[in-house]
Image: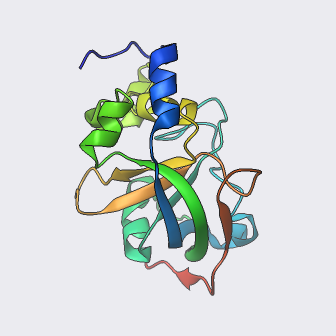
Amino acid sequence: MTRKPYGAKLTVYEARRAMAMRWDERSGTFYRIVFEADQDQVLAGARHPEGRFHHGGLPALYLSCRADWAAKAIETYRQPGDPRRLAVPLQVERAKIVDLRRADHCAQLSIQKLDAAVPWRPQRQRGQPADSWRPADIVRSSQADGMVYPARSAPERWHLVLFRWNALGGPTITAAGAATLVPE
């Protein structure tokens, strides 16, 4: 498979093929980690304009199917003296997703699965666009609601990032119970 340069748009053929793709649909309880003081903002999406799968202020909501997996995913971002964090359960209904663990999904969209695993922060510190943005941008342009991606450190763990939610045509996300304190 030929790798497209970063920022390259899908061809008309690729876009039609992507639109015809049968998405996986995900519904269920997922967890988001937030600072305790930000619990009322749990559905607001990522706080920073750039992250592993978003840039330029694009919306992204990072979730995990297990609270302990969500806690593991944010370990690299924790700093000494950070405020307490909570794992907030959220009910996701009818999210159309691309699953990067599935070779057929990646092939249909010409996604290089390994791009999602490249650490994004060192690239940004060098002023480069993050390789991990490439699969996210392709998924966004395919009209999927988001994508499932494996954890870099343990491929058996996986996470969900949504690019749209609680909007016309997108999945519905609601609070699904009491938040729990994330151990330090």
Residue 169, x across and y down, in percent: 71, 50
Residue 111, x across and y down, in percent: 34, 30
Residue sticking out furthest to the bottom: 178
Check the image and report above or below for 133 versus 26.
Answer: above
Q: Is there any visible trace of residue 115 in the rendered image? A: no
Q: Which colour scheme is used?
A: rainbow
Q: Quadrant of the N terminus?
A: top left
Q: Which of 101 and 45 is in front in this view?
A: 101
Check the image and report above or below for 108 versus 76.
Answer: above
Check the image and report above or below for 4 versus 105.
Answer: above
Residue 184, x across and y down, in percent: 43, 75
Check the image and report above or below for 53 versus 153.
Answer: above
**Residue at the spot x=38%, y=27% of the render?**
131
Q: Where is residue 124, by image quadrant?
A: top left
**Residue at the spot x=45%, y=39% of the render?**
21
Q: Quick check: 61 left or right of 3? A: right
**Residue at the spot x=38%, y=75% of the render?**
68
**Residue at the spot x=35%, y=32% of the render?**
108
